[in-house]
Image (cartoon, helix red, strand yellow):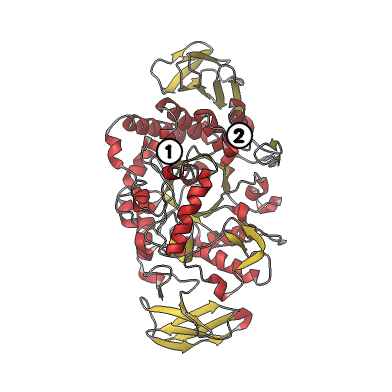
Amino acid sequence: MTLFRVWAPLAANVQLLLDGSLVPMSSEQNGYWRCDCSSAGHGMDYAFVLDGGDALPDPRSPWQPYGVHGRSRVLDHSRFRWSDAGWRPPILSSAVIYELHIGTFTPEGTFDSAVGRLEYLQQLGITHVELMPVAEFSGAWGWGYDGADLFAPHHGYGGPDGLKRFVDACHAAGLAVLLDVVYNHLGPSGNYLGRFGPYFTTRYSTPWGPAVNLDGAGSSEVRRFFCDNALMWLRDYHFDGLRIDAIHAFFDLSAVPFLEQLAGEVKRLEAHLGRSLVLIAESDLNEPRVVTPTEAGGYGIDAQWSDDFHHALHSVLTGERAGYYQDFGTLGDVGRALENAFVFDGRRSLFRGRPHGRKPEGLPGWRFLGYLQTHDQVGNRAKGERSSRLMNVGRLKIGAAIVLCAPFIPMLFQGEEFGADTPFQYFTNHEEPDLARAVSEGRRKEFAAFGWKAADIPDPQDPETFSRSKINWAELEREPHTSLLAWHKQLIALRRRTPEFADGRLDQVEVRFSESEQWLAFRRGGYVIALNLSQETRRVPFAFPGALVLASEADCIIHKTSVEMPSDSVAILRVINNGRDI
């Protein structure tokens, strides 16, 4: 017996299309329709017909083998045999996260082929793998942020069983798995939700059109849809946590915000399953309540991305000052981020033209993720250049040392650890000609405003844009990639074995710097991380004798209370006597 149930309050009549026949569905309370079919089972295709119209995929379709416009398929989750019964993920505060995109991580671009790289991630020292969105989206390839069937793993990656095999293999390799989910918009291609019910509202607008309806009429069932989606990934696919995309695009005036509801439901599932589950938010609000426990009046999200840390670090390493980088660019900003997480905690932002943010009083560093590269910060550049194309090897090593020695949860973007030369560009494979043309033209117009020539901007619809974004693993066999990989391994191993680097107390981070001489040093317990960004050799001072632990350049010279460093170098020192000041 298979129960088919759908929320369609806008329809006067709903039928189930199953095996070529239309079966009437009966109405229930709150706009739901249902049908019990004894003849339906795993692997059967179906669709819903509203008021005699076209056959539409199930909004909660678990399997879309024909893409976003095709029929849905019944999935029996109990058929898969998991081998991770004893799995317990590492706690988030100890994490080293690796963000990857299934389609470009390997030449084949599938869940199964990605399994072949798990040993590499083990040896690197990664604890958590974070997948960019895998919910069914338009076409054969894409970033995944325009998903339309949020309950169905993308058929081109390997579908439901392929994803389960990947997660199961990760757990066997000791790797926790996080999934990026997008609840602020859908589609546009294949987004049929608006035909079923009031999933969207015109009371608010977003860069993607009408906002998701989180606080208007019918919003309780819309929230149920997204909460059930989150619980499904955690329960049925054994994910260890979710990264929630762009929560600043949620418009929600409810007394109990959607994020708080979601966090509460995940905690209850965690108690039931008996294993840790985490939620990580992407937010540019600089709002501490996002990661403040609900008991203290917050939303209860476990951690959030820290763009201020990225912007401060990126701008000093590259010298870029365009767009939002105009608010950054000094070593003082880097120091403020290290000590405070937010650079803008009520300070006036030139880019925004107003004060921005709020001070994260009392929050530990492991409420924040720190990174030099992400899919956004690379892929939303006109040409998708990685840091390896924007700075020299010395500065890449400096960036890695700061990220991996900072008081935050470090995250790397695929290929960053060896300075991958391949870009990560914005690519789509929309099948509708008008939409494909609009996406290509929109991308050119977006970057023309920044002075880029239209001919220099890769066409998202060009298959070559996707192909050139794939990781070239052969680079590992030559310099400087080999040395950069070794550097990242050393830093991760140092972080893993050193208690001071797991200490999330921001008030224990001490920073000293000189803007004029372009050096900075920060202290983590008994260790000092010193860096020289000037074009000359500098002596970076600290108050107590130190012993060299790790240096990016062999000619760093240790003096009694300073380290002499060549240009664009970084050194990590252990303080010999446990004084308080750098």
- Tell me which amino acid carries mark 2: Gln
**Near-viewer residue (238 or 14):** 14
- Tell me which amino acid carries mark 1: Arg
Q: Is residue 190 above or below residue 483?
A: below
Give the quarter of the image for residue 98: top left
- Relative horizontal placement of residue 188, taking residue 213 as reference (left or right): left
Q: Nearer the viewer, mark 1 or mark 2?
A: 2
Q: Residue at x 37, y 31 (%)?
A: 484
The mark nearer the N terminus, 1 or 2, is: 2
- Mark count: 2
Residue contact at pointers 1 and 2, CB within 8 angstroms: no
- Relative horizontal placement of residue 397, taking residue 342 as reference (left or right): left
The percent position of residue 542, horizontal first and vertical second, equals 56, 16
Kindly identify which residue carries mark 2: 326
Q: Residue at x 51, y 10 (%)?
A: 560
For disc 1, the neighbor class at 10 Å (few under 14, some 14 to 19, many from 20) is many
- Relative horizontal placement of residue 217, taking residue 502 as reference (left or right): right
- Residue 237 shows in this picture: no
Rendered-image quadrant of the C terminus: top right
Kindly identify which residue carries mark 1: 386
Please give the label number shown on residue 32. none
Q: Secondary structure at mark 1?
A: loop
Q: Secondary structure at mark 2?
A: helix
Q: Is residue 568 above or below residue 100?
A: above
Q: Residue at x 35, y 31 (%)?
A: 486
